[in-house]
Amino acid sequence: MSTTTARSIVKDIQVSGLRGRWWVTALFGVLLLVAVWMLLNLVIGGKCGADCVQGTLAQTLRVATPIAFAAFCGVLCERAGVVNIGIEGQMLMAAMAGYAVNLFAFQALKDSIGIEAAGNLSRWLAVLAGILSALILAALHAVVSIEFKTNQIISGTVINILSVGITGFLYRQFLAENLPPGPGTFPIAPIPVLSQIPVIGPILFQQKPLTYLMLILAFAIHYVLYYTPWGLRTRAVGEHPRAADTLGINVYRIRYINVLVGGLVAGLGGAWFTLEAVDVFNPLMTNGLGFIGLAAMIFGKWNPFGALLGALIFGLGNSITSTVSIFRPDIPSQLPQMLPYLLTIIVLTGVVGRATPPAADGEPYEK
Amino acid sequence: MTLALQASGITKRFPGVLANDQVDFDLAKGEIHALLGENGAGKSTLVNILYGLYQPDEGQVAINGQPTRVASPHDAIAQGIGMVHQHFMLVPPLTVVENIILGYESVTRGTKMFGQMSVLDRRTAAQHIRALSQQYGLEIDPDAYVRDLPVGAQQRVEIVKALYRQADILILDEPTAVLTPQEADDLFVIMRGLAQQGKSIIFITHKLREVFAVADRISVMRAGRMVGSAKPADATSESLAAMMVGRDVILQIDKAEAHPGQPVLRVENLSVMDDRHHVMVNGVSFEVCAGEILGVAGVQGNGQTELAEALTGLRRVADGKISILDHDVTHATPRQITEASVAHVPEDRQKHGLVLTFPVRDNLVLCSYYRTPYAHGVEIDYSRIEQTAADLIHTFDVRTPGMATAVGSLSGGNQQKVIVARELARPVKLVIASQPTRGLDVGSIEFIHQRIVQARDRGAAVLLISAELDEILSLSDRIAVMYKGRILDTLDAKSATRQICGMLMAGVVQY
Ligand SMILES: Nc1ncnc2c1ncn2[C@@H]1O[C@H](COP(=O)(O)OP(=O)(O)OP(=O)(O)O)[C@@H](O)[C@H]1O
Ligand SMILES: [Mg+2]
C-alpha cells in the first residue's frame, strides 16, 4: 500500500477535531487504544494479558461486521442524497431469508451431493438469498422515495415495520419449531500464511468470510467514491443535484443504483446474523444494529473508513463488555455496554467536531 | 456569414405565464450578442431552452445551420453549447478540478474499459485546465476547493467548465450581477479574447454600461417577446432603457437636500470575524442619522457582508458596541432587531431573504406574520395577509402569476422585489440594504432607488451597502469607504467623485 493511499484512508477517518498530519491521527488512535486497555486492566485487576487482548480485538472485528455493513449501506445511499433508515429492516429480512434458505437448501441438497458439499453450497445460496431479499426492500425504498418523491424517513420507517411484520409472521408459520437440522454457520476460514502472523494473524485473518468481505468492501467503497467517475458523480448528486443535472448527469439513475447497491450491502450485513453469528433466527434479532450503523456512518462523516472506525468502536465496546463480564461478574454488564453509545453522543453533539451531511441529503430532486 | 445558432418561433408557457412568445434569436460565429430585458422578460427561459433544461412548446433551433433538437443539457454539451447559470452551478465541497470534470471525466489510460468504475485522472485534467486558463486568461487554481473561492473566481471556474467541454457557444446568464466593476472589466477582456478565438457568446445583463463595453449586437426582450435589436453604435442608454421598459426611464435620480436628525444607528469599535475566524471588520465606528443615507462603498470582500450580518443579528459580534436609538443591540437576535423598526435587505436573496418554497404571499409577511393584524393568538388571518400581499405586489410591480406561486419560481429580479417590498413597506426607522438592486432591470432600479429616497425623506436612517459605485454616488448623502475591514474615510457626497472613491476602494489614502 503506497503512502498516498494510506494518507487518503487516514484522512477518511479523521474526525475534524483531529485534522492535521495523518500520522498524528494514527498515533493518537494507538495511544487511545493503549489507554482503553489500561483502564480495562484496572477494572478487572490486571488479568487481560496478550491472549485476552487478542481475543477481545478479534471479537471486536466480528461484532463490528454487521454494523459496518449497515454503515456502508448508509454511506452509499446518503452520499447520493437518499436517507435510508430502513437498513435495520433490510438486514432483518436478509437474516431471515438467509436462515431459511440455508436450512431448506441443505435439506434438498444433502442427499444428492453429500453433507459437506451441501453445507458449503447452501450457505452461499443463503447469502445470495439474504442479498436478494434486502435488494427487494431497497428497490421499494428507491421507487417510493426517488420516483414518487415521498418523504424518505417515512419510506424507511415503513420498510422497518413491514419487515418486522413479515419476518415475525413467517417465523411463526415456518421457523419456530419442528425444524430439521441445518448446516450451521460458516466455519472460521483462516487465510493461509497471513493467519500465521503473530498478533495480527489471529485478529484479522482467522475470521469468517463475511467479515473479510466487509473489510474488502471498505477499500472498494473508498476507491469508488474518491477515485472513479461514478464516485465523483455520486458525491456531486448528494451535494448539489441541480448542478449535476446541468452537466448532463442523470440524478435519478445515480440515486437508484446507489440505493440498490446499498441494499445489497445491507443484505450481507443481515446474512451475518444467521450465517456467521448464531445458527438460529429470532424475531427482531438485528436488535438496532442497523441504526447503530447509521450512527457509525455519522461518526465517520459519511466516509467508508470513518464508518468502519465507528463500527469498530461499537464492536470494541461490545467485546470489552464480554471480557469484563467474564472476569468481573459482579459488575452489571449494562455499565460497560453504555460506553460506545456515550461516545457517540459526545461525538454527535460536536465536541470532537461537527458532522455535516451531504447538502442535499434527504431531499427528493425535482427537475 | 454562418450562424452559430438560430432559434425561431420559440414559445414556452409556464402555469399562468407566457414566458417566451414566438421568440426569434440568432448568434453569428465569433459574435458577442447581448440580451437585455426587464426582470421576468423571459431571458433565462430562452437560454435555458437553448441549453436543453426546458423544452419549448413551439419553435425550432438550428446549430451551425443544421436543424436540431436539444433535449437535455447532455445534448447541448454534445453540440458544443456551454452555459454559466444565473445562480452558480458549482458543488462547494468539491475541488475546482472535480467541478470542472464532473460528468466529462478524463480517466487513466488502460482503465477505460471499466467505464464509470475506471480511475479518474486528475493530473491530466488539471494540466488541461491550466492550459485552458492560460490560453484564455482565466486565472484559477485547479486544486482549490470551490467553497473557499470568492465569487469572481467561481465565475471563472464556471467559464472554464464550459470551455473544458469544448463549447463553441457560450451562454452567460447575468455573469456580472455578482461581480465588482473591476472584476466585470476583467471578464470583458476574457470575453473579447474568447470571441477572437472563434467562440460565440450570448451575454445577458441589466447593466447598460456593460452592453456598450462588450457587445457586438444587442437584442431586447419584453414580456416574453423580442422587441428589438440594435448595434451598440446606433443605440444610447436612454433608447435601450426605453425599449426594455416600454417608457422613458430616469437614469439619474433626483433627490432633495437631506435634513439629518438624531443619530439612529451608532456603531462603536465594531469587530466581526468570518466563519474561518479571520477578522473581517476591524474596529469600525460610524453613525447614521435619521433622514440621511450613508453609503458604504468598497470592493466586495472587504468586510461589508460581515458588517451587515453583525448589524442585523445574523453574526456574532467579536468586539465593540451597536446601538439603535440608544438601545444596545450588540447581542440582540434578528427578531429583536426587526422589532426595533429595522428593515433588512440581505445580500444573498435566496439564502437569507426568502423561503424559496413558500408562496409569494407568505414571503411578503415573513417579519410580521405573528403579530396583529395578521395573527390573532395562535390563528393566522390569511385574508389580511392576502390583502397586504395583493397591495404590495401591485405597488412594487412584482411580476408573478399569482400570490400563491412559490417565490423560487419567480425570475431572479422579481425575487428581489419581493424582499424590497416586504422590507420597505413597513414603517421603519432604520434601513440596512445590502446590494438592494442586484440583478434588477433599470426600471426596477429606478423604482427601488425612489423608495429608498422616500424612506429617507420620511425620516428613516438608511445604511446602503453596495458594490456598485454609481449606486452609492447617486443615492448617498455621505459615503464611507471600506477597505480590509476598516473605514478608510467618510466623504460628503457633494465632494466625492468616482476617482476619489475608486482610490480609497483600492486602499490609497493620499490624494
Ligand atoms: N420553472 C418555472 N416555473 C414557473 N414559472 C417560471 C419558471 N421559470 C420562469 N418562470 C416564469 O417565467 C417568466 C420569465 O422568467 P425568466 O427567469 O426567464 O426571466 P428573466 O428575463 O431571466 O428575468 P431576470 O432578469 O429577473 O432573471 C417569469 O414570469 C417567471 O416567473
Ligand atoms: Mg434570469
Image: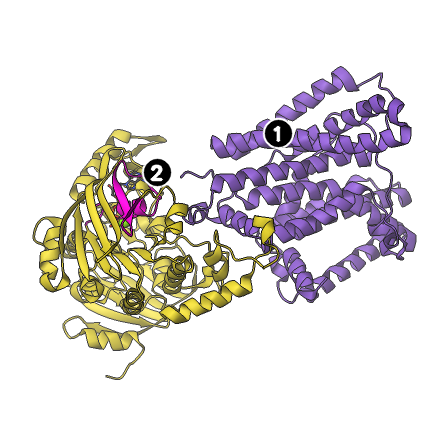
The answer to whether residue B46 is magenta is yes
Q: Is residue B231 above or below residue B350?
A: below
Q: Secondary structure at mark 2?
A: loop
The amino acid on which the numbered mark 2 sits, given as a three-letter code, is Phe
Would you call the spot at circle 1 few (<14 residues within 10 Å), some (14-19), or many (20 or more)? many
A49 displayed left or right of A220? right
Decide: marks 2, 1 in contact (CB < 8 A)? no
Quickly name the residue at label 2: B358
Would you call the spot at circle 2 few (<14 residues within 10 Å), some (14-19), or many (20 or more)? some
Instruction: Say whether mark 2 is within 8 Å of ligand 1.
Output: no
A311 displayed left or right of B403? right
Quickly name the residue at label 1: A137
Q: Chain of mark 2?
A: B
The amino acid on which the numbered mark 1 sits, given as a three-letter code, is Leu
Q: Secondary structure at mark 1?
A: helix
Question: Looking at the image, which residue is at 75% across and 44% down?
Answer: A213
Return the x and y of residue B1 as percentages of the image width and height.
Answer: 21, 58
Q: Is residue A150 visible?
A: no
User: As rendered, which of B28 and B52 lies closer to the eye?
Assistant: B28
Quadrant into which the C terminus of chain B falls: bottom left
Give the chain letter for purple: A
Cα gap from disc 2 to disc 1, whole angstroms = 34 Å
Return the x and y of residue A166 as percentages of the image width and height.
Answer: 67, 21
A296 displayed left or right of B268? right
Q: Residue furthest bottom?
A: B510
Q: Is residue B151 above or below residue B118?
A: below
Front: mark 2 or 1: 1
User: As rendered, which of B2 and A16 lies closer to the eye?
Assistant: B2
The magenta span reads B38-67
